[in-house]
Image: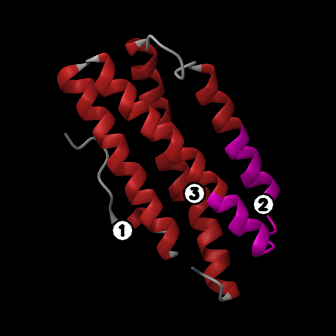
Amino acid sequence: MTFVQWDGSMAVGVARIDEQHKELIDIINELASALGTTRQQDAVAKAVDTLLRYVREHLRYEEALMGESAYPEANRHFQEHISFEAALAAFDLEGAPLDIEAVDKMFFFLTSWLVNHICLSDQKFGQYLKEKGTPR
């Protein structure tokens, strides 16, 4: 099941970030599939765990790159990440048993937030890196 489709409008122009965004979208689609077909605790829990772990890894990568590149809007961008992670934590999905309704709500929140964040904040950061001549 494809819930989110990657397209060129989502590209930030930094290969590693774009690769990570594509991976996030793949994981989101795996969760959509688990929610839409089986709704089995094990499959959904595994997809949620993978997604939350990868989200953290990706955000830490972006934040490190912002620091290394002296991105002037890093503090604002960091705050977006902090607010996002706090909102994810509020869904309380890291325990067992997993509340499938909470996963559904988190799924739609995360998907909407991520697409908007990529298309606005991350693209702005990507443009900064390209102008500075330091895209990775």
> Horizontal and vertical percent for residue 130?
61, 83
**Does label 3 or label 2 sit earlier along the sequence?**
2
The mark that comes first in sequence, 3 or 1, is 1
Q: Secondary structure at mark 2?
A: helix
In this view, 121 is above or below 112: below
* Residue 71 visible in the snapshot: no
Expressed as whole percent of the image width and height from the top left, the position of residue 5 reads 29, 52
Q: Is residue 33 magenta?
A: no
Count of numbered marks: 3
Would you call the spot at circle 1 few (<14 residues within 10 Å), some (14-19), or many (20 or more)?
few
Depth check, front residue: 50 or 37 = 50
N-term mark: 2 or 1: 1
Residue at image mark 3: 120
Any part of residue 74 in sight:
yes
How packed is label 2: few (under 14 Cα within 10 Å), some, or many (20 or more)? some
Q: Residue at x 75, y 51 (%)?
A: 78
Pick whichever, 25 or 5, lies toward us. 25
> Disc 3 versus disc 1: distance between alpha carbons?
14 Å
Q: Amino acid at mark 1?
A: Gly
Q: From the viewer's perspective, tell me whether residue 88 is left or right of residue 79.
A: left
Dot 2 and dot 1 residues touching (CB under 8 Å): no
- Kind of residue indicated by mark 3: Leu
Image height of 39 relative to 70, above or below: above
Q: Which residue is mark 2?
A: 74
The residue under label 1 is 8
Q: Is residue 96 above or below residue 9?
A: above
Identity of the residue drawn at 59% across and 72% down: 126
From which residue to which does the magenta span run?
A: 61-82
- At label 2, the amino acid type is Ala
> In which quadrant of the rendered image does the N terminus lie?
top left
Q: Tell me what residue is drawn at x 63 percent, y 60 percent.
A: 61
Question: Label 3 vs label 2: CA separation?
Answer: 14 Å
